Amino acid sequence: TVGSPVTTEQEAQQITSYVSMFLVFPMVLAMPAMQNPDATWIRVLSFFPLFTPAFMVLRIPIQMPATWEILSTIGILLVSSVGMMWVAGKIFRTAILVYGKRPTLPELWRWVRAA
């Protein structure tokens, strides 16, 4: 659904590169997370859905987080996954109707709110 608002392969590649930057960023922070898994900033970023899989996998074997942290991050991941599927569906539904026009970020936001 990331590629639904684009019409050419070049535009899809550009959007994919932006998405992959978000996915690589947690790996850049992996070494500091392994050195100090109980640091406040690591614990806070563990609750952000893009960082949760990477940081919780690193934290659990090194120093077991509290049970409430594990359960709450799982809950946040589930809710954010369902929410993102809902948002992606709205964007996809509108993008199909305006095929050929490259949307801007404000337009994508309007599509989510309007659909």
Image (tube, grey):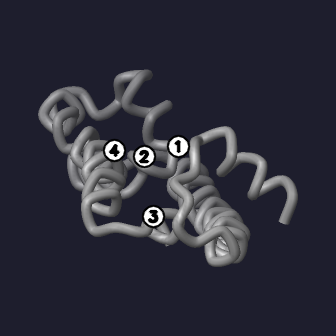
- Give whichever of discs 3 and 4 has the lower sequence position: 3
Tag 3 and tag 4, C-beta contact below 8 Å = no
- Give whichever of discs 2 and 3 has the lower sequence position: 3
- Give whichever of discs 2 and 1 has the lower sequence position: 1
**Residue underneath mark 1:** 47
Cα distance in 3D space between marks 1 and 3: 31 Å
Q: Nearer the viewer, residue 40 or 13?
A: 13
| Residue at the image point whose x is 75% and y is 57% from the top | 111
Three-letter amino acid code at the position of disc 1: Phe
**Residue underneath mark 2:** 65
Q: Nearer the viewer, residue 6 or 84?
A: 6
Query: Viewer-nearest of labels 3 and 4?
Result: 3
- Give whichever of discs 1 and 3 has the lower sequence position: 3
Q: Residue furthest front?
A: 100
Q: Image height check: is 45 above or below 47?
A: above
**Residue underneath mark 3:** 6
